[in-house]
């Protein structure tokens, strides 16, 4: 089994090494040779020195078969994405080749444009940098372009720009930066999956590692990696940071969580978690690194972007800054709690708009904080901690005014595999896992014709399943003596019945929405 795992890790790292080397050398031949060397080195190293002490007794034949099939699918997905990343003209290799929205949308474009504009002390939140001069604020946004790709809008705090500005030093051209960014995001997610699997122990770690290809094979993951949204990097860095804190690597963990927090704000709920658990050194290092990175940004860019951010911040919190709300289809795929107001508006509910969304958001905020505090104050076994961390991150992401389904589904997909890994991998557990995976894969590109109300109803299934997974993760208990071993899936049966009902409906809703879109 470890030969299979080592080979898979070797191929995956080779793919990411290929795109990174292609960005730096502009030679596909050199990139191929380097990728092959990296794959051989990683394969040999991981085979001789396993990253995780695999527990054969923790697996079942069904789990091994499922893992093998999912692994093949995941590697095919990564190869296709790598081809499209290196050669954007090869649209047939994109995640959804038939969708112009999927192939031409690039979140990274906003980071690149903002990083360049910040160097000239321009207002990085000026819509003129990202939208056409004739853009009508009452209609779907008309985006500027960078070559083949449409420019997205920058909506993050200024310290985040430290990363794209640093990468632009070695990859100043956008297409090169796109290749390097793909390698960074994919490589960091792969590292996070391995670090967490190793942390939870041999039994749960073996199962989570074998189930992890389901995350990579999922359409939301491939779409997010293809578009270059930083959500992958932030979630992965936050999880790695929490593991580092457990191993008393406070400086490195603080740097990762500090950067994640000042870049996207929502990982700050993990900072609250650290305070509640009285992990003072971890919290102190996180705060110190956040302040240090902020000061570094001030030295690099000056006060201008911070002043612009303070002016822009109310629109970020309230949602007015997001042009996606002009598009009913984008409203329909919004997973956030404040976004529920706009979904209700699609169905003609009066009084639903930005004010209602703000009310929903501020009601939800203390509820999410209290849930995080309650989870922090209880005893947690080693196998339970990553479940709690990821559940807290998901709770925090749901507070955002706009959370598209592609980026929202990645953490629940990972949580699904980690949660399933704490149970015995019998047929029932595996079928529930597959059904949950199918539900979280309900996906519809924004430029495919469909009634937004149908799309909103279809997305209620993965949205509800996300909440169910968070509840299951926060309620999960493993006996102290058996923390690394699976327990019977009969525990919390009433909740599991709810989960089963939701996931069984998922594929049917996805099929019905597809039929409605093509009708």
Image (cartoon, rainbow, N blue to C red):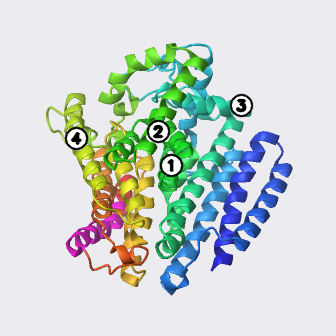
Crowd rating for badge 2 (residues with CA inside 10 Å; few <14, some 14–19, many 20+): many
Drawn side of residue 379 relative to residue 197, left or right: left
> Do the CB atoms of the residues marked 2 and 1 lie less than 8 Å apart?
yes
Question: Which residue is denoted by mark 1 in the rendering?
Answer: 241
Return the x and y of residue 287 as percentages of the image width and height: 45, 34
> Do the CB atoms of the residues marked 3 and 4 lie less than 8 Å apart?
no
Crowd rating for badge 1 (residues with CA inside 10 Å; few <14, some 14–19, many 20+): many
At x 39%, y 29%, the residue is 323
Q: Quadrant of the N terminus?
A: bottom right
Bounds of the magenta segment: 492-510
* Corner quadrant of residue 68: bottom right
Secondary structure at badge 3 equals loop
**Which label sits in the foreground, 3 or 4?**
4
Separation of marks 4 and 2 at Cα, in angstroms: 22 Å
Drawn side of residue 338 relative to residue 83, left or right: left
Question: Which residue is denoted by mark 4 in the rendering?
Answer: 366
At x 26%, y 72%, the residue is 496
Question: Which residue is denoted by mark 3 in the rendering?
Answer: 173
Q: Is residue 437 above or below residue 157?
A: below
Drawn side of residue 23 relative to residue 306, left or right: right
Crowd rating for badge 3 (residues with CA inside 10 Å; few <14, some 14–19, many 20+): few
């Amino acid at each position: 089994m470890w030969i299979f795992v080592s080979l898979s890790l070797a191929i995956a790292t080779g793919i990411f090494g290929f795109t990174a080397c292609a960005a730096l050398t502009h030679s596909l031949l050199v990139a191929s040779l380097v990728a092959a060397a990296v794959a051989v080195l990683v394969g040999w190293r991981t085979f001789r020195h396993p990253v995780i002490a695999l527990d054969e007794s923790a697996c079942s034949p069904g789990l091994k078969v499922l893992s093998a099939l999912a692994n093949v699918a995941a590697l095919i997905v990564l190869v296709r994405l790598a081809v499209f990343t290196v050669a954007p003209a090869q649209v047939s290799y994109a995640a959804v080749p038939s969708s112009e929205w999927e192939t031409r949308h690039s979140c990274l474009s906003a980071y690149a444009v903002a990083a360049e504009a910040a160097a000239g002390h321009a207002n990085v939140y000026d819509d003129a940098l990202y939208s056409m001069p004739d853009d009508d604020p009452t209609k779907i946004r008309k985006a500027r372009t960078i070559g083949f790709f449409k420019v997205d809008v920058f909506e993050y705090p200024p310290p985040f720009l430290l990363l794209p500005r640093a990468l632009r030093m070695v990859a100043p051209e956008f297409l090169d930066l796109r290749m390097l960014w793909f390698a960074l995001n994919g490589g960091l997610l792969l590292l996070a999956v391995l670090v967490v699997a190793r942390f939870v122990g041999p039994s749960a770690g073996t199962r989570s590692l074998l189930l992890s290809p389901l995350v990579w094979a999922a359409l939301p993951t491939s779409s997010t990696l293809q578009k270059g949204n930083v959500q992958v990097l932030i979630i992965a860095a936050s999880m790695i940071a929490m593991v580092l804190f457990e191993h008393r690597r406070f400086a490195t963990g603080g740097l990762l969580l500090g950067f994640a927090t000042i870049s996207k704000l929502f990982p700050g709920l993990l900072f609250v978690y650290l305070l509640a658990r009285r992990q003072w050194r971890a919290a102190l290092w996180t705060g110190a690194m956040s302040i240090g990175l902020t000061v570094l940004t001030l030295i690099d860019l000056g006060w201008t972007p911070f002043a612009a951010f303070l002016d822009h911040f109310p629109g970020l919190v309230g949602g007015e800054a997001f042009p996606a709300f002009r598009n009913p289809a984008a409203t329909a795929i919004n997973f956030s709690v404040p976004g529920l107001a706009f979904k209700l508006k699609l169905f003609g509910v009066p009084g639903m708009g930005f004010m209602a969304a703000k009310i929903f958001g501020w009601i939800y905020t203390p509820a999410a904080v209290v849930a995080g505090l309650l989870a922090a104050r209880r005893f947690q076994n080693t196998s339970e901690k990553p479940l709690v961390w990821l559940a807290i991150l998901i709770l925090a992401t749901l507070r955002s005014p706009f959370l598209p389904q592609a980026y929202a589904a990645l953490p629940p997909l990972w949580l699904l595999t980690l949660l399933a890994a704490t149970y015995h991998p019998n047929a029932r557990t595996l079928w529930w896992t597959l059904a949950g995976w199918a539900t979280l894969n309900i996906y519809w590109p924004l430029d495919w014709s469909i009634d937004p109300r149908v799309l909103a109803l279809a997305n209620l299934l993965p949205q509800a399943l996300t909440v169910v997974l968070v509840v299951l993760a926060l309620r999960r208990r493993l006996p102290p003596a058996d923390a690394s071993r699976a327990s019977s899936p009969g525990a919390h049966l009433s909740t599991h019945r709810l989960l089963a009902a939701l996931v069984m409906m998922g594929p049917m809703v996805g099929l019905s929405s597809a039929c409605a879109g093509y009708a």
